[in-house]
Image (tube, rainbow, N blue to C red):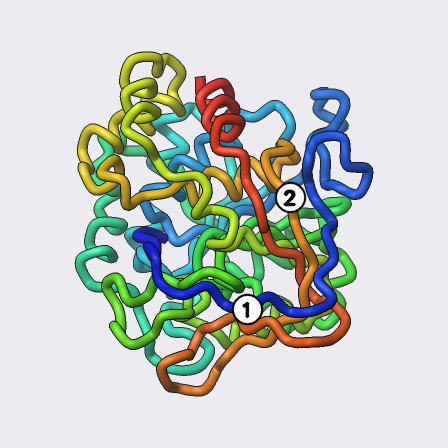
């Protein structure tokens, strides 16, 4: 996803929020593993819509010694279309000399409605965001995203799912396999805006001030995932708005990039001025780092409902009173995030 809201109104906080932070030293936090041996790596399935910052997130997790990527699914309801998106991911894996990882796509229409990312954004994602990506003999998984998710969950202990686009694939898998939720350790989802403005008015309907793009495109999917009884941690705009891409960080990347992943980020920064003009944030790389257990911020608990009805608030993750059903990223440490991102990518 891209472009964030600036200024505008802040929603009133709901009673009963419970801090369950992921700060360093917090025993309740999803902290990093104490050892980097293969046996102790987190098993992660990435669901991506292949936006520019998704490519950085994938590169980060490939480089991290704390994670084993078990599979990658492409959200065809996100920025990339299925065929092109799968091709971009396979060629990115080739460029990064990654091990063999199964890649599959799901449906290309939301579960309900017909909302979509702007055509220009989708064309850019289909083109790999302009990255120099090699050809590859790697082939897609011979099945759908739902089949790959369920197979991977069956083959993995405590599989963690990281979604970087609309939650369509995961919602379809949870709906079609009633026992899947019990086999997933947790879901980290880059999406939502609870107590800060949304961002769909940038490129989308100007009267919607509350929705974030990934949830806006398929709110029915987001609600289905939340209702599945999983541990759901939202890497929401509440936290990601605290980690802008600064000019100083972009210059540091251009100067210090050495590893394959860091060179991907440097190439993206060089080719896309919008990523370094102050309007871009470390959305998906931060989500990847949090999913990998790096203590870069704090989560708070809330009960939410997703607005599914058409209108100026469709896609809003609305805080309501009651027992919490999600955790959302309420704070993030920009300096720590920058340091971890560069270190791991290098």
User: Secondary structure beneath disc 2?
Assistant: strand
Residue 298 - label: 2
Q: Position of residue 172 (x, y in %)?
A: 56, 70
Left or right? Give the position of 1 relative to 305: left
The image's mark for residue 100 is none
Give the distance between the C-alpha atoms of the residues marked 2 and 1, in whole angstroms.
19 Å
Q: Residue at x 37, y 68 (%)?
A: 108
Of 12 and 246, nearer the camera is 12
The front one of 103 and 338 is 338
Where 341 falls versus 310 (above or below)? above
Residue lying at 34% horizontally and 57% vertically, measured from the top left? 7
Q: How many marks do you count on the picture? A: 2
Along the line of sight, the residue nearer the viewer: 295 or 127: 295
Q: For residue 66, what is the image quadrant?
A: top right
The image quarter in which residue 35 lies? top right
Residue 40 at x, y percent in the picture: 75, 28
In which quadrant of the rendered image does the C terminus lie?
top left
Q: Where is 116 relative to 98, above or below?
A: below
**Would residue 318 appear left or right of 277 to someone viewing this image?**
right
Which callout, 2 or 1, points at the residue further toward the start of the chain?
A: 1
Is 67 situated left or right of 279 in this image? right
Is label 1 in a helix, a strand or a loop?
Answer: loop
Foreground of the two, 218 or 332: 332
Residue that appears at 59% across and 66% down: 13
Up-down: is 202 above or below 172?
A: above
Disc 2 residue crowd, few under 14, some 14–19, many 20+, Cα 10 Å: many
- The picture places residue 232, in percent across and down from the top left corner, at 66, 58
Can residue 88 be seen in this snapshot?
A: no
Which residue bears the numbered disc 1?
Answer: 12
Position of 107 relative to 130 (above/below): below
Residue 41 in percent (x, y) is at 70, 30
Q: At x 42% / y 79%, what residue is drawn?
A: 314
């Amino acid at each position: 996803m891209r472009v964030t809201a600036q200024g505008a109104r802040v929603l009133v906080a709901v009673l009963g929020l419970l801090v369950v932070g992921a700060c360093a030293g917090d025993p309740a936090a999803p902290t990093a593993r104490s050892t980097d041996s293969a046996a102790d790596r987190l098993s992660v399935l990435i669901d991506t819509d292949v936006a520019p910052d998704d490519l950085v997130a994938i590169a980060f997790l490939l480089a991290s010694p704390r994670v084993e990527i078990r599979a990658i699914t492409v959200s065809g309801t996100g920025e990339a279309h299925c065929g092109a998106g799968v091709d971009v991911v396979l060629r990115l894996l080739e460029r990064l000399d990654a091990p063999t990882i199964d890649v599959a796509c799901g449906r290309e229409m939301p579960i309900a409605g017909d909302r979509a990312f702007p055509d220009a954004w989708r064309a850019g994602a289909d083109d790999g965001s302009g990255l120099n990506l090699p050809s590859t003999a790697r082939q897609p998984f011979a099945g759908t995203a739902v089949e790959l998710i369920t197979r991977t969950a069956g083959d993995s202990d405590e599989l963690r799912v990281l979604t970087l686009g609309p939650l369509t694939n995961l919602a379809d898998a949870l709906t079609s396999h009633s026992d899947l939720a019990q086999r997933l350790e947790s879901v980290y989802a880059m999406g939502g805006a609870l107590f800060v403005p949304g961002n769909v008015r940038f490129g989308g309907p100007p009267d919607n001030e509350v929705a974030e793009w990934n949830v806006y495109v398929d709110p029915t999917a987001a609600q289905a995932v939340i209702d599945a009884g999983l541990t759901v941690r939202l890497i929401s705009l509440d936290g990601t708005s605290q980690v802008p891409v600064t000019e100083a960080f972009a210059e540091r990347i251009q100067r210090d990039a050495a590893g394959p992943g860091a060179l991907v980020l440097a190439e993206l920064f060089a080719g896309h001025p919008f990523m370094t003009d102050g309007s871009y944030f470390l959305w998906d790389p931060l989500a990847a780092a949090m999913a990998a257990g790096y203590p870069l911020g704090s989560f708070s608990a809330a009960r939410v409902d997703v607005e599914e009805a058409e209108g100026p608030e469709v896609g809003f993750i609305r805080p309501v009173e009651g027992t919490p059903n999600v955790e959302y990223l309420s704070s993030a440490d920009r300096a720590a995030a920058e340091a971890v991102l560069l270190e791991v990518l290098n």
